[in-house]
Image (tube, rainbow, N blue to C red):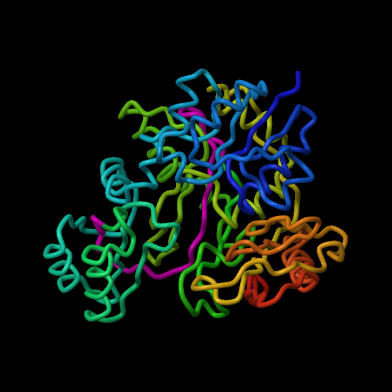
Amino acid sequence: MSTNVLVIGGGAREHALVWKLAASNRIGQLFAAPGNAGTISLAEHLALGANDATGILGEIEARGIDLVVVGPEEPLARGLADRLTGAGVPVFGPTSEGARIESSKAWAKELMRERDVPTAMALTCDTLDDALTAVYDTPLPVVIKADGLAAGKGVVIAESRVEAEQAVRSMMGDGSFGDAGSRVLIEEYLTGMEVSFLAITDGRTVMPLVPACDYKRAHDGDRGPNTGGMGAYTPPAVMTSEWNDWTMRHVITPVVEGMAARGITYRGVLYAGLMLTDHGPKVLEFNCRFGDPETQVILPMLDADLVEICQATATGHLSSLDAPGWFPGACVGVVVASGGYPGTYGAGHPIHGLNDVPDGGIVFHAGTTMRGSEVVTAGGRVLTCVGRGEDMASARALAYEAARAVQFDGAFFRADIAERELR
């Protein structure tokens, strides 16, 4: 039987999800809310915001939607899955209690300590005075994190006490991140290579995905401000099968079991951001959803039916599926961003070259919209240009060929995505 699926969200992650779901022979009607200029050829768009639970529920009932796949973290933290599951709708994405793994870094730290998951030492501070004291008691550099959701930008790595104090005062005193910064974590600084490890779970069975590496800084050489992600690749050579197994045993499974012990049946993606330190992997953060831009390189490698996986997860039957297959080789994604991002940037610039992408290249849309028959920019991260190849070098070459093919005023991208894997 075919399955009618609704994907919530409108970024490149959601375009990748729509693209992979559309390839399933189980797919019936496919919807996106709100979608973007890239998803319009694959799914019917619903004029709904990702947080409009009432409107989403109405469309589900009106259109006979069988499964909802939630892309962004905010609607999950706000309880979209709670509302839909309460109405009997299968949802790929955790309830608000489960989403606390991302929406409250302090809650996540507490759970990690409870389950002996290796992570950076941190102090949770509820007052400005406590936070100011903590930054002067913690060795430099020191990491200051807003406790709540801050669109991937609520982290400051301070090299000096003055910089640390400014960050704390900005978050807690000036409210630079709103309620997300009313509580902060003062955390030790870890060094090493960062790896994203994602797994799908229905609260009991856990299915690991291929690990990936993303690039958070805006410019080459990891310089410039933090962004939502400027590119990604998979698989990182450092993540051997032994390290993957270790991560499952010591990070992913303990957290899933820890949430179950708290009465939380976690259904969806559990994403662990790891730092590979000299003392072994340590968790930097958890996310309650697919990563962006990691999803754009993981899903092209998946040799399995995503509708089947999401439906089994949402209904608690993941154990009925075999482990997914994976295409050989590698995948690289390069984010093409608007000039000025992650600061002030323009919008409405026509995007050229979308029909000139080389064979095998994939372009996932993020900040795009239609203006008449023309695709124009509508965000900071505009596109993720992806290449899959028999090895990292060929995948990387294809991704950059695609990135150079698309053009708009002010477009820029990092030139060093996956470069370290070629050394």
Quadrant location of residue 159? bottom left
Q: Nearer the viewer, residue 78 or 384?
A: 78
Q: Nearer the viewer, residue 186 or 167?
A: 167
- Position of 309 with respect to 155 (left or right) is right
Q: Position of residue 398 (x, y in %)?
A: 79, 66
- Position of 14 with respect to 205 (left or right) is right
Numbered-mark total: 0
Q: At 88% from the left edge and 60% from the top edge, which residue is drawn?
A: 359
- Position of 70 with respect to 365 (left or right) is left
Q: Position of residue 354 (x, y in %)?
A: 81, 63
Quadrant where the C terminus is found in the figure: bottom right
Question: Relative to 159, does residue 120 appear above or below in the rendering?
Answer: above
- Position of 169 with respect to 83 (left or right) is left
Q: Is the stretch drawn in magenta largely helix, strand or loop? A: strand
Q: At 63% from the left edge and 59% from the top edge, which residue is drawn?
A: 367
Q: Position of residue 145 (x, y in %)?
A: 31, 61
Q: Nearer the viewer, residue 238 or 261?
A: 261
Examine the rendering and report whether any part of residue 170 can be seen.
yes
Inspect the magenta stretch and tell me whether residue 9 lies in it.
Answer: no
Question: Relative to 294, does residue 399 appear above or below in the rendering?
Answer: below
Examine the rendering and report whether any part of residue 423 can be seen.
no
Quadrant location of residue 393? bottom right
Q: At 75% from the left edge and 60% from the top edge, which residue is drawn?
A: 375
Q: Position of residue 28 (x, y in %)?
A: 76, 27
Q: At 74% from the left edge and 29% from the top edge, which residue is drawn?
A: 29
Inspect the magenta stretch and tell me whether residue 200 lies in it.
Answer: yes
Q: Which residues are magenta?
A: 182-207
Quadrant where the N terminus is found in the figure: top right
